Amino acid sequence: MTKGSPALVELRNAGKTFRKRQVLLGINIAIPADQNLVLTGPSGSGKSTLLRLIAGLEAPSQGEIFLAGHLASREESVLTSPSDRGVAMVFQDLGLWPNLTALGNVRLGLSGLKLPRREKLERARAALADCQVQHAAREYPHRLSVGEQQRVALARAMAVRPRVLLLDEPFTALDIVLKDGLLDQLAQLSAKQTTRICLVSHFPPDALALNAEVAVLEDGRICEQCRLDSLPREPRSRTLQAWQRRLNGEPGIWGQF
């Protein structure tokens, strides 16, 4: 990150409460302009909620969220709408419209942009090509493989040329070959469009494919953040302790994660 430049996303003491249940507490984390991030941790630790706060789909119960140095959300208030944040999000269920073709789904993602109709069409086609799924432009989601559906969802998100792309465990249904291919594609698109990626994943090594830092969310707090290739000898988080035991061939509880 250039010295003195604001982070693309920054959460300051952010928290979220649902019906008196504290899901997130005192979150302080930033996504700089030159760094991708993999957010990991046990199921139910608040990872998806954290992405929704960044996207503006939820307001924090406490704290503040800044985008490129500008206050976007504060306690119980979303000040910058999701469509004006320069943030795109791919959900775990992908959210493709079954009655629209692949091209139609990507074009729909551009509907909020004030662009000429022809430019939207050209951008949608280019996004499908960038995600290597242009051959399926006229196909409906139910006629596509799982991997092709993933690529269409990714194309829809990347077509708006976001500054930050949020991915909420979109690869859980993929085999390792398809997943590795999509991670490589993501890394290439991130470099091409200078889009930063925040990926929620239960598999910390995904950070290596994206040249990203790993942030571990446990019990509603960020308890550790580091690069996986410089993993501390004694990680603080249960998640990275379990991963380290697996690397060392020791019995552990990785299956919980």
Image: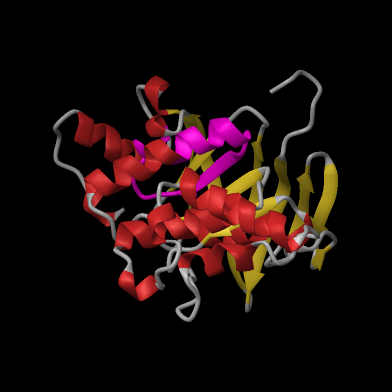
Which quadrant of the structure image shows residue 3?
A: top right
Q: Position of residue 219 (x, y in %)?
A: 49, 55
Residue farthest front in this picture: 118
Q: Is residue 167 visible?
A: no
Q: Position of residue 95 (x, y in %)?
A: 49, 71
Q: Is residue 75 visible?
A: yes
Q: Position of residue 52 (x, y in %)?
A: 62, 61
Q: Is residue 202 magenta?
A: yes
Q: Position of residue 62 (x, y in %)?
A: 75, 59
Which residue appears at 46% of the width and 40% of the height?
186
Q: Is residue 55 above or below residue 199?
A: below
Q: In which quadrant is the N terminus drawn?
A: top right
Which residue appears at 47% of the width and 65% of the height?
102
Q: Is residue 238 above or below residue 104?
A: above
Which residue appears at 41% of the width and 73% of the height?
140
Q: Looking at the image, what colour scheme do you see? A: secondary structure
Q: Is residue 249 magenta?
A: no
The residue nearer to you, when weighing 130 against 193, is 130
Counting the numbered discs, the total is 0
Q: Is residue 107 above or below residue 201?
A: below
Which quadrant of the structure image shows residue 251?
A: top left
The residue nearer to you, when weighing 97 against 118, is 118
Provide the residue span drawn in magenta.
Answer: 186-207
